[in-house]
Amino acid sequence: MKGKRVIAGILLVGILAVTLTGCENTDSSKKETEKPVITLGSDNYPPYNYLNEDGVPTGIDVELATEAFKRMGYQVNVVQIDWEEKKELVESREIDCIMGCFSMEGRLDDYRWAGPYIASRQVVAVNENSDIYKLSDLEGKNLAVQSTTKPEGIFLNRTDERIPKLGNLISLGHRELIYTFLGKGYVDAVAAHEESIVQYMKDYDASFRILGEPLMITGIGVAFAKNDDRGICEQLEQTLEEMRQDGTSLKIIGKYLDDPEKYLEVDDLGY
């Protein structure tokens, strides 16, 4: 009988432990769902923001935002947006912020910014057998860009004396289309963030050649509406800087990009 009582006691302790653990998990989940939600808008832009095999948003920006806002006491809801409508969406508060490899250069007066938290090169890519080797070789050529992106403005405005006059500048609504146009020979070159081009080549086994001379090196930031005075933007900037200093950002970026240290060299960007 004594042995049976001991066994019964052990079973009771086990049941209580499982019950208490279940309660703790439930309480933890409840606390998480009770956190205020930040709605982050981005388009599909690997390796910064894209859907994984399970249809869940992932990427550099998704992981950085999730960790940063968690530290700030928020949970993040990442939504796919039409990139051309980003400014209207954030100003109407349909989304709280824009975070999708978003260049701050030339847009400092358009938004309230947290950043830069990453340094990125805007570059030109061509097919491997192309006779284009430097920016001046683009004279009279056809080039594709994603609409409303920094490269579009660079080639439209031509304020940089290195930028030649193109034959045609083709602006397309989606990132993937510019690479399809290049691969099929519809254009001679494309211009985009270097990380985006490298990721596309990995994903689709494409063979492009990136010109050695960058269009520019720009800072990537998180954009809030200009009149957003909630203080979230300023808190996010401080938190992202803390993550850069404590190695969290390096660890996250290193999961997606080689030589992650170079992407964190933001101190000399002049913002």
Image (cartoon, grey):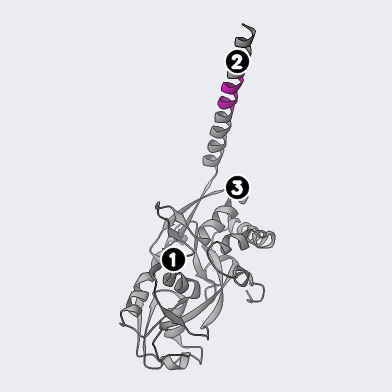
Magenta highlight range: 13-20
14 in the magenta segment:
yes
Q: Quadrant of residue 3?
A: top right
Badge 1 marks a residue whose secondary structure is loop
Position of residue 73 relative to residue 132, above or below, is above
Residue 7 tag number: 2
Crowd tier of the residue under label 3, counting other residues whose Cα lies within 10 Å: few below 14, some 14–19, many 20 or above: few
Q: Is residue 15 visible?
A: yes
Residue matched to label 1: 45
Badge 2 marks a residue whose secondary structure is helix
Q: Is residue 247 left or right of residue 79?
A: right
For badge 3, the amino acid type reads Gly
Q: Which residue, as the protein is rendered here, is positioned at the far top?
A: 1
Residue, x 67% and y 73% (percent of image)? Answer: 267
Residue matched to label 3: 73
For badge 1, the amino acid type reads Tyr
For badge 2, the amino acid type reads Ile
187 in the magenta segment:
no
Residue, x 63% and y 13% (percent of image)? Answer: 6
| Sequence order check, earlier mark of 2 and 1 | 2
Q: Is residue 75 left or right of residue 166?
A: right
User: Which percent across, then down, holds residue 150?
Assistant: 47, 77
Crowd tier of the residue under label 1, counting other residues whose Cα lies within 10 Å: few below 14, some 14–19, many 20 or above: many
Q: Is residue 237 left or right of residue 90?
A: right
**Quick one: 89 or 143, which is closer to the camera?**
143
C-alpha distance separating marks 2 and 3: 44 Å
User: Which percent across, then down, holds residue 192?
Assistant: 45, 76
Badge 3 marks a residue whose secondary structure is loop
| Sequence order check, earlier mark of 3 and 1 | 1
Quadrant where the N terminus lies? top right
User: Which percent across, then down, holds residue 101?
Assistant: 50, 67
**Quick one: 155 or 256, which is closer to the camera?**
256
